[in-house]
Amino acid sequence: MAKYCEICSKGVSSGNKISHSHRTSKRIWAPNVQRVRVIEDGTPTRKYVCTRCLRSGKVLRHV
């Protein structure tokens, strides 16, 4: 599955997972990306869109 939003270009970010004893290991944070049918230039296409863009109305979903 895609790891970035095709609308706002939000992608994965990385950092450290820190345990209670403060030992660190690498980890990633991925956005919640859904594959939805959206209206683009009057035609429905499938895109990977994050749920923040879906909720805020940046994308017009095809029904």
Image (cartoon, rainbow, N blue to C red):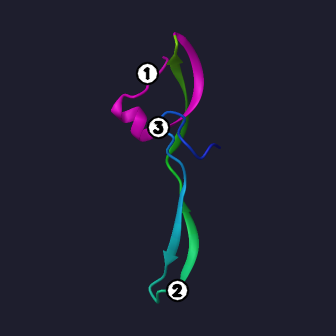
User: What amino acid type is highlighted by mark number 1?
Assistant: Leu
Image height of 20 relative to 3, above or below: below
Residue under pointer 3: 8
The 10 Å Cα crowd at callout 2, few under 14, some 14 to 19, many 20 or more, is: few
Q: Earlier in the sequence, mark 3 or mark 1?
A: 3
Query: x and y percent of residue 29 in the render?
Result: 51, 59
Q: Quadrant of residue 45?
A: top right
In the image, which disc is placed on residue 23? 2
Image height of 31 relative to 14, above or below: above
Q: Could you tell whether 16 is left or right of 58 in the image?
A: right
Query: x and y percent of residue 14 in the render?
Result: 54, 63
Q: Earlier in the sequence, mark 1 or mark 2?
A: 2
The 10 Å Cα crowd at callout 1, few under 14, some 14 to 19, many 20 or more, is: few
Q: For marks 3 and 1, give the CA distance.
A: 14 Å
Residue under pointer 1: 60
Seen at 52% across and 10% down, the residue is 42
Q: Could you tell whether 6 is left or right of 1 in the image?
A: left
Residue 32 on the magenta segment: no
User: What amino acid type is highlighted by mark number 3?
Assistant: Cys
The answer to whether mark 3 and mark 2 are in CB contact below 8 A is no
Identify the element where label 3 is drawn.
loop
| Residue at the extreme front of the image, as rendered | 9
Seen at 42% across and 33% down, the residue is 54
- The magenta region covers 42-63
Q: Which of marks 3 and 2 is nearer the N terminus?
A: 3
